[in-house]
Amino acid sequence: MYHNLFLFIVVVISSCSLIRCDMGDFLSVPTTVKAQENNTVLLPCYLNTASNDGSFITAIKWYKDDDLIVDSADEELPLPEGHMLWENGSLEIFRVTPNDTGTYICEIIRPEPWSPIKQRHAIEVLHPPSVEPFPPDGFLQVKLGEEVRMSCKGSGVPYPIITWYTQGEEIKLLNHRELLKFTASDRQMAGIYECRAANGVGEPATAQIELNIIYPPELMTSRSWIHTAPGHRVQLECKISADPQATVTWTKGDIPVPLDSRVVSLVDGDKYTLLIKNVQKSDFGIYTCKAINELGQGELQIQLSGVPNPGVFKKTDDKNINSKNSYTLIWEVDSYTPIIEYNLWFQPYKPKTGLSKPEWTKLTIPTEHSSSGPVYSKSYTIKGLKEKTVYEALLVSRNRYGWSKPSPILRFATLGADLTEEIITPVQHHTQDNIIPLDLSSASKIHRLHIFSCLVSFSAIIYCFNF
């Protein structure tokens, strides 16, 4: 019986010599210390002598990340600077720095038959975040439509959270990430991107990356059709955005516009202007503004014409309050050349169902030459209208150079119809449809009423044949 008890005790002692029986051997407990930079840290290493039958310490060793830094039994191993070993085995580190971050192991050497025992501690020296952008120079250039990849590598203890911003607003991402990746689908996405690293220690760190998106020329103009007359001065303007900068040329037809003292090409920032002084009839036509850079090209057309500007209907609700079978229209037309005549089309308004045929009625109305221009005004009363009916009307004007484009459509109503006020809607048209053929328009006699069959398409009003 006593023999078995002795074997049991030996087995327990042997087992503790093979493994670290930290729980009973140490009074201290494993510790992770989070300390601000320049603070002092104490790592405990207390032996529980009661559990070891009064055994004592023969030596203390401390390891940092598996490297021996302290050995009480080795007088030739100096203590690291700023470190002090206490008699109870604890290690004190003064004015910690980020380099002191790591895993520390205390090893207590005891006399036979006791084996060495170890206890693990850790130090995290908290320090503010820092961030390094990629590209390192903070500049990234891509082509329109290419993938954008930029990143910010953060550091600090604890590891910082990365957040991205642009134009002063946070970019909403599924998670906080160092890599920002997207497609440069719009050149407006260019600009400054900022990454911000924060870990709760000190102020957040930031880095900026400038994104430049290069793209082929994009052209715009405020007027694609310009009215003028011989002897006047006119400017054709073309606004161009391009990166790299584009080379710009002006052509009329397929021939480059000859430049001289009368025809001058001007550049002001992104605005390119063709200035024509003292316009001649031969200047009328379609001009092309063409821009080319290494990524592509673009062009737009501007027509210079002597025909009148589209007419504009004026509101006349107050003049037609009690109009049952008639309606007075007033319009204005801008033209540097005297207006010869107007064609006024009107018909009962029907919602476009695709089933009903247009029933346009055309009136040819002469001018009275009471105005010398450039604004010509006219009032005309349409008679014989149906009561309680909504109508729509449009106008074209002719001068010596031809017919104008159609005016916006005016919707009006006789007394009792369900329309509270006049409505003006624009007419869309193609460049080639901007002049009404003279052979169709001149067939009308003054004050003579004609009925035309007209087709209304989505892009233009096409004036058809007389029947």
Image (cartoon, rainbow, N blue to C red):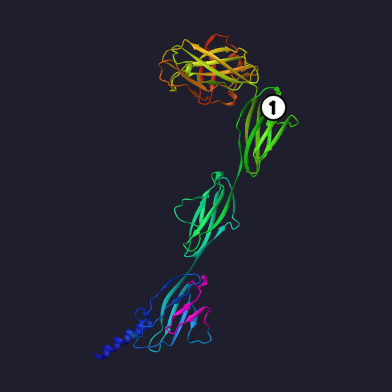
Between 131 and 327, the residue placed more toward the observer is 327
Residue appearing at x 47%, y 78% in the figure: 92
Toward which corner of the image does residue 446 lie, by quadrant? top right
The x, y position of residue 66, in whole percent, is 48, 76
Between 337 and 64, the residue placed more toward the observer is 337
Main secondary structure along the magenta-highlighted residues:
loop
User: Please, what is the three-letter code of the amino acid marked with disc 1?
Assistant: Arg
Reply yes or no: does residue 94 show up in magenta. yes
Q: Is residue 121 above or below residue 176?
A: below
Residue for badge 1: 233
Instruction: Specify whether 151 is left or right of 388.
Output: right
Residue appearing at x 53%, y 56% in the figure: 151
The extreme bottom residue here reads 2
**Residue 358 visible in image:** no
Between 454 and 111, the residue placed more toward the observer is 111
**Residue 356 visible in image:** yes
Residues in magenta?
A: 78-101
The x, y position of residue 387, in whole percent, is 42, 13
The x, y position of residue 169, in whole percent, is 50, 49
